[in-house]
Amino acid sequence: MQNALPKTASNPDTVSRLRYERERCARLEAERLLEIKSRELFEANRILEQTLQKERRLAELQMEFVNAISHEFRTPLTIIDGAAGRISKLTDCENSVSIHKKCESIQSAIQRLTRLIDRCLSVTEYLPRTKRD
């Protein structure tokens, strides 16, 4: 059989098979790398989602805390402010100037604390809002 071609790199069938094998190996390697990167991406996404949920919960807790503190301060401050105003108006003795100054000092301190509470509440407006289910 003289017509049989020797299997050498110059044989077109051998070259095609070699090219096919290289391409198949390259495709398998690309698929393997894609699978690895997909798993890594999935895990990173899962971690980001958990972190985001924690951040949302912390923002919600912070807002609840600030609102509770605001209420706990405002109620007594309103009572004290009202009492100081009544004391200031009812004073008709010789120490009335001293009492008026002390009442004004109390009311001034109440205004400062109220502004501080208002600033704290305004900060919570910038926190991300969470949807309640």
Image (cartoon, rainbow, N blue to C red):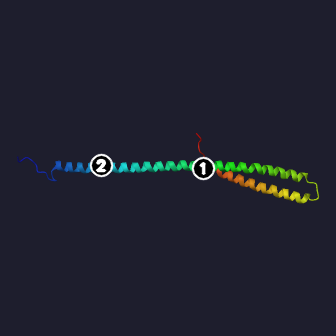
Taking the image as drawn, is residue 125 in sight?
Answer: no
Secondary structure beneath dot 2 equals helix
Compared across the picture, whether 120 is left or right of 40 comes to right
Query: Relative to residue 130, is residue 21 drawn left or right?
Result: left
**Residue lying at the far top of the rendered structure:** 133
Q: Is residue 107 left or right of residue 33?
A: right
What residue appears at the point 75 percent right and 55 percent down from the top-left corner?
Answer: 113
* Dot 2 crowding, Cα within 10 Å, few <14, some 14–19, many 20+: few
* Coordinates of residue 23 in the picture (x, y in percent): 26, 49
Q: Is residue 80 visible?
A: yes
Residue type (three-letter) at the residue carrying disc 1: Ala
State the image coordinates of residue 19 (x, y, percent, origin top left). 23, 50
Residue type marked 2: Leu
Secondary structure beneath label 1: helix
The quadrant of the picture occupied by the C terminus is top right
Asked whether 112 or 62 is in front, the reply is 62
* Residue occupying image coordinates x 55% and y 49%: 54
Q: Residues at badges 1 and 2 in contact (C-beta under 8 Å)?
A: no
Residue 126 x, y percent position in the rendering:
63, 51
Can you give x and y, in whole percent of width and height, for residue 104 in the image? 84, 57
User: Which numbered marker is on residue 59?
Assistant: 1
In primary-sequence order, the first of circles 1 and 2 is 2
For the point 51% across and 48% down, the residue is 50
Residue bearing the label numbered 2: 28
Graded by Cα atoms within 10 Å as few (under 14), some (14 to 19) or many (20 or more), the crowding at tag 1 reads some
Give the residue at x 71% y 50%: 70
Which of the 4 image quarters holds residue 100? bottom right
On residue 113, which mark appears? Answer: none
In this view, which residue lies farthest toward the left?
1
The Cα–Cα distance between marks 1 and 2, rounded to whole angstroms, is 46 Å
Q: Report the number of numbered marks.
A: 2
